[in-house]
Image: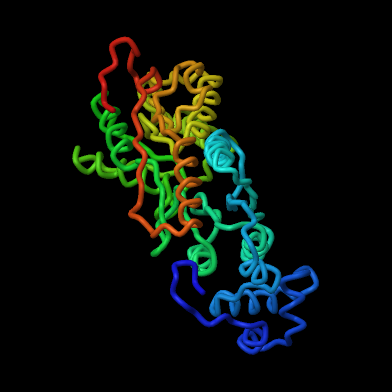
């Protein structure tokens, strides 16, 4: 029986073995001890399992027994304040419902499919958070056997989805920079389709198009501190080369940019810290904005102009919805939680007189 109520034949280990062209012993070993299976053979088994929507025996047996009273969460990592707040909101809501939470962090070095399938035998439903946490085909496979929701990633058909608003707020943030006279505005963040940062990039592009401006350089990096430092070093290196060649005035802008829209606060704060330590005036020469409104953002010098999202609320809503699906509720339309632009100094404003753009 599929999670949405439609009946479906249950694939067997024999069918997986036949589909992959291996023995049933190899299939069993692929799921119980994948390190002992040759990489090419393991890939063939996992692909066959995905095609057939096969669930290993331990997880399949769990489908027929009483509830585990636990919710599963799949995340790429829990580094940084965003994921921590998202997870806390989810866990608090689950606890209030009398449910525990089982967390699966997907190590990029291991077959992701195995981690998720192992989770199925221990939980009543699964929440997939962030685009890089799992591929769409894995989400679909899990949704066939367990109630499933997704958070902050592209929607998979038939799976209830939860988002924080990104596109409109990013457009407003970029428009605000344009109002400050910024014309060479770059973007920092990895553009995964359907992801939060991907939607922020769309809003940024819309604002530039409306103003008749061409997008400046896009730095497609992971939204972590180290990437922010790396981008700042690149900007400083380009600036030094231009100064030595006599092609920059050194007055306005740096490395051909006069503003950066960053995918999150972690990137923005790392860039600001490195540039200011090198003597670059932020926002005088380069305006920088972030996203998430982390606690540190308000104590940074200059204070970080950013976007506040109710991340804990997003996690809580996902947990509550997942519990409702487990109890038999029908799927619903995607849910979007509001976001608001927060004006501080890093965009060029003085907070006391900053215009309201949220």
The single residue placed furthest to the right in the displayed view is 36
Where's the C terminus, which quadrant? top left
Q: Nearer the viewer, residue 183 or 289?
A: 289
Q: Residue at x 28, y 37 (%)?
A: 171
Classify 42 as above or below 152: below
Apparent side of residue 88 relative to residue 213 in the rendered image (left or right): right
Percent position of residue 72, x then y = 59, 53
Classify 206 as above or below 236: below
Apparent side of residue 66 relative to residue 174 in the rendered image (left or right): right
Percent position of residue 90, x then y = 54, 41
Classify 258 as above or below 32: above
Q: Is residue 230 visible?
A: no
Residue 41 occupies which quadrant of the picture?
A: bottom right
Residue 273 occupies which quadrant of the picture?
A: top right
Q: Nearer the viewer, residue 270 or 37?
A: 37
Q: Is residue 274 visible?
A: yes
Colour mapping used in the image = rainbow
Q: Residue at x 25, y 40 (%)?
A: 208
The single residue placed furthest to the top in the displayed view is 352
Q: Nearer the viewer, residue 15 or 279?
A: 15
Apparent side of residue 352 relative to residue 291 in the rendered image (left or right): left
Q: Residue at x 62, y 87 (%)?
A: 15
Classify 20 as above or below 4: below
Percent position of residue 318, x then y = 47, 47
Apparent side of residue 195 relative to residue 205 in the rendered image (left or right): right
């Amino acid at each position: 029986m599929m999670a949405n109520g439609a009946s479906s034949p249950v694939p067997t280990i024999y069918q997986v073995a036949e589909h992959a062209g291996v023995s049933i012993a190899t299939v069993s070993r692929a799921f119980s001890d994948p390190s002992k299976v040759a990489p090419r053979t393991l890939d063939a088994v996992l692909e066959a399992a995905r095609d057939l929507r096969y669930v290993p025996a331990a997880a399949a047996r769990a489908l027929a027994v009483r509830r585990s009273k636990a919710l599963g969460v799949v995340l790429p990592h829990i580094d940084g304040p965003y994921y921590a707040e998202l997870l806390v909101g989810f866990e608090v809501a689950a606890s209030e419902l009398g449910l525990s939470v089982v967390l699966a962090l997907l190590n990029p070095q291991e077959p992701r499919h195995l981690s998720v399938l192992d989770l199925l035998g221990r939980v009543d439903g699964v929440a997939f958070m962030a685009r890089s946490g799992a591929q769409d085909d894995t989400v679909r496979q899990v949704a066939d056997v367990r109630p499933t929701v997704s958070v902050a990633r592209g929607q998979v058909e038939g799976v209830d989805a939860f988002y924080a608003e990104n596109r409109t707020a990013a457009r407003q943030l970029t428009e605000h920079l344009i109002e400050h006279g910024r014309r060479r505005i770059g973007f920092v963040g990895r553009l995964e389709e359907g992801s939060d940062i991907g939607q922020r990039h769309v809003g940024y592009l819309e604002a530039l198009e409306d103003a008749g401006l061409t997008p400046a350089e896009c730095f497609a990096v992971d939204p972590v501190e180290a990437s922010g430092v790396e981008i700042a070093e690149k900007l400083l290196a380009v600036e030094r080369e231009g100064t030595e060649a006599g092609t920059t005035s050194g007055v306005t802008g740096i490395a051909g940019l006069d503003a950066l829209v960053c995918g999150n606060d972690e990137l923005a704060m790392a860039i600001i810290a490195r540039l200011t330590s090198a003597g670059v005036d932020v926002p005088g020469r380069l305006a920088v904005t972030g996203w998430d409104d982390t606690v540190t953002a308000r104590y940074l010098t200059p204070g970080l102009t950013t976007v506040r999202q109710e991340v804990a609320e997003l996690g809580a809503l996902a947990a509550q919805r997942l519990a409702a699906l487990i109890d038999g509720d029908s799927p619903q339309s995607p849910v979007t939680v509001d976001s608001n632009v927060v004006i501080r100094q890093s965009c060029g404003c003085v907070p006391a007189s900053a215009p309201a753009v949220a």
